[in-house]
Amino acid sequence: MSKDDLPNIIIVGAGSAGSRAAYQLSKKLDTTKYNLVVINPRPYTILYPATARAVVSDKDNLKEHIFVPIEDILKGKGRLVLGKATKVEPASGKEGGSGGTVTVSNGETISYRALILSPGVSWDNPIGFPDGADGLNAYLASDRESFEKSEKIVLVGAGAVGLELCGEIRDVFPDKQITMVHGDTLPLNSFYPEKYRLAVQRSFEKRNITFLLEEYIDTVPNLGEKITEVKTRSGKAIEADLVLSTRGQRPNSELIAESFGADTLNSRRLVKVEHTLQLKGHQDIFVIGDVIDWNEQKQAFKAQAHADIAVGNLLSLLKGQNKFKKYTGSFEFLFLTNGKNGGVTYINVFGGITLGDWITRMAKSKSLIVPLLRGHVGL
């Protein structure tokens, strides 16, 4: 049998979960029996924990380290197909289990023996990076110019992404006016204890960041639109010449809903999976990453843990062993950076431990864990 005739193992999406799965399969898959195919709209994976610093300034040359070519991860052991998966069709109909095909936006239809779906999530500017092979340099330049030219910045959403972006802006621009608008009574969400959330608020307020809590901005002005203020839902006016949405991620679950039915998603459009990370009713399809319905905070390390479980189970499936490991969740912690030299850490032990600048700086703020993240994909 020629290489072209071998069954395909397909990974759809190469974010934190998909890139880790690609790396693991590039090492472990028997390439005399199977082809490895990765479908992704960009030729690179993005190390998202470091993006807040990269979009504000080019001082650390992070671009060269956090936009990682997928070909570098595959090391010749797989094929990258540039495009978006638009349809999945199981060979045996809705129940699946006998392989199927994936249709790609570039016109290809590729058969699979087993499939890992890791479509990830979408973000707004300034970390809503473009698809395709081109446009990244222009996108980063536009982001950085927006921060450079603005004087009164409003971030809508004080979750981890918004807070870390705020810290990076303050590092580079110590005199700009920065306001965070957040719908809850404290930064972050209610998973984290009040003590920790208060510590986070104080950490940023010490750097002259203003919080406007229990307020909402429903319509965020377009990037580049000339404005002098923005109004909250209650009618409060905030001086602003740059407003950015940092309200969180949106699951890219449309492919799964359209291919397998709307009942594969929960009310938040997250994908229902078995404890083995198989799509319910489809033993040869695994779903991993931020898109899955799992009671945990969404983080890159957890997505990578999903990948390790799914790859192990996929290899067992190919061997006919059907001895699948269960994903039981991951340890909850948060190293929340406040620029390069500070931040607040939460560790979910003994009722929740809150730690400050020193431990956060050493654990994450200085390097943004870029060497560790690159190591997790074999670089």
Image: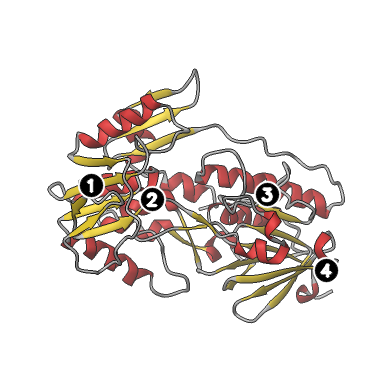
Please provide percent x and percent y for residue 180. Answer: 27, 46
Q: Which residue is mark 3?
A: 272
| Residue 34 rendering spot, x and y as whole percentages | 77, 64
Distance from Cα at disc 3 to Cα at disc 1 = 37 Å
Label 2 or label 3, whichever comes before in sequence order: 2
Reading the image, the residue beneath label 4 is 91
State how far apart marks 1 and 4 are (Cα): 53 Å
Q: Amino acid at mark 1?
A: Thr
Q: CA distance from mark 2 to mark 3?
A: 29 Å
The first of marks 3 and 1 along the sequence is 1
Amino acid type, residue under disc 3 in the picture = Lys
Q: Eyeballing the image, is 121 above or below 367?
A: below
Which of discs 4 and 2 lies nearer the camera? The answer is 4
Amino acid type, mark 2: Ala
The residue that label 2 is drawn on is 50
Kindly identify the residue that appears in the image at 60 percent across and 50 percent down.
Answer: 267
Residue at numbered disc 1:
179
Residue 77, visible in the rendered structure: no
